């Protein structure tokens, strides 16, 4: 099976990306890159596209590294934690009020 081609737009420029991932996945990644570049450009208007792309790559890599360093939470632990929070909110009567409001 040959890699699929997906056309995306980043900062108004069109790119065709070939990959094994789904078109939706590739498009979502492109949206994340576009959003990161736009955020940086909003703070640093005088950057050329190359420097903007490098800063976006550094920001995205930083986010990835931070997530890798976070302790992994098992789904069962997350479920237990969230359930406990909901029970506490119910005990305080907050959930019912929020849902009714």
Image (cartoon, grey):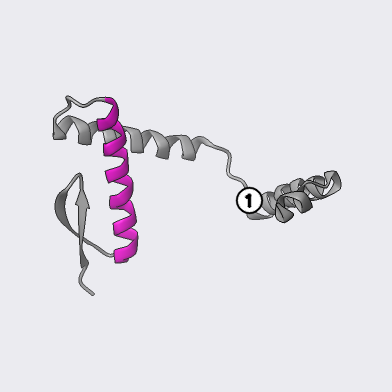
Q: Quadrant of the N terminus?
A: bottom left
Q: Secondary structure at mark 1?
A: loop
91 left or right of 58 in image = right
User: Which residue corresponds to the image point at 31% horizontal and 35% vertical from the top-left?
Assistant: 39
In the depicted structure, whether residue 43 falls above or below residue 98: above
Q: Is residue 62 left or right of residue 69?
A: left
Q: Residue at the far front: name it.
A: 101
From the viewer's perspective, tell me whether residue 61 is left or right of residue 3.
Answer: right
Q: Nearer the viewer, residue 45 or 16?
A: 45
Quickly name the residue at label 1: 74
* 100 to 62, vertically: above or below: below
Q: What span is in magenta? A: 22-43
Tell me if mark 1 has few (under 14), some (14-19) or many (20+) residues whose alpha carbon lies within 10 angstroms of its own: few
Q: Quadrant of residue 47?
A: top left
- Residue 75: in sight, yes or no? yes
Looking at this rendering, what residue extends furthest in the bottom direction? Answer: 1
Where does residue 67 sit, x and y in percent of width and height? 48, 39
Whether the magenta-drawn stretch holds residue 25 is answered as yes
Residue 4 x, y percent position in the rendering: 22, 68
Q: Is residue 68 magenta?
A: no
In this rendering, the count of numbered labels is 1
User: Which is the main secondary structure of the residues drawn in magenta?
Assistant: helix
Residue 21 in view = no
Camera-side residue of 4 and 40: 40
**x, y percentage for residue 57?**
28, 37
């Amino acid at each position: 099976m040959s890699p699929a081609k997906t056309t995306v737009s980043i900062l108004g420029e069109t790119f065709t990306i070939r990959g094994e991932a789904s078109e939706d996945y590739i498009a979502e990644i492109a949206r994340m890159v576009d959003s990161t570049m736009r955020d940086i450009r909003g703070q640093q208007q005088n950057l050329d596209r190359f420097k903007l792309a490098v800063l976006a790559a550094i920001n995205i890599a930083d986010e990835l590294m931070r997530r890798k360093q976070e302790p992994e939470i098992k789904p069962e632990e997350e479920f237990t934690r969230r359930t406990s929070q909901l029970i506490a909110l119910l005990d305080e009567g907050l959930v019912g009020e929020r849902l009714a409001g």
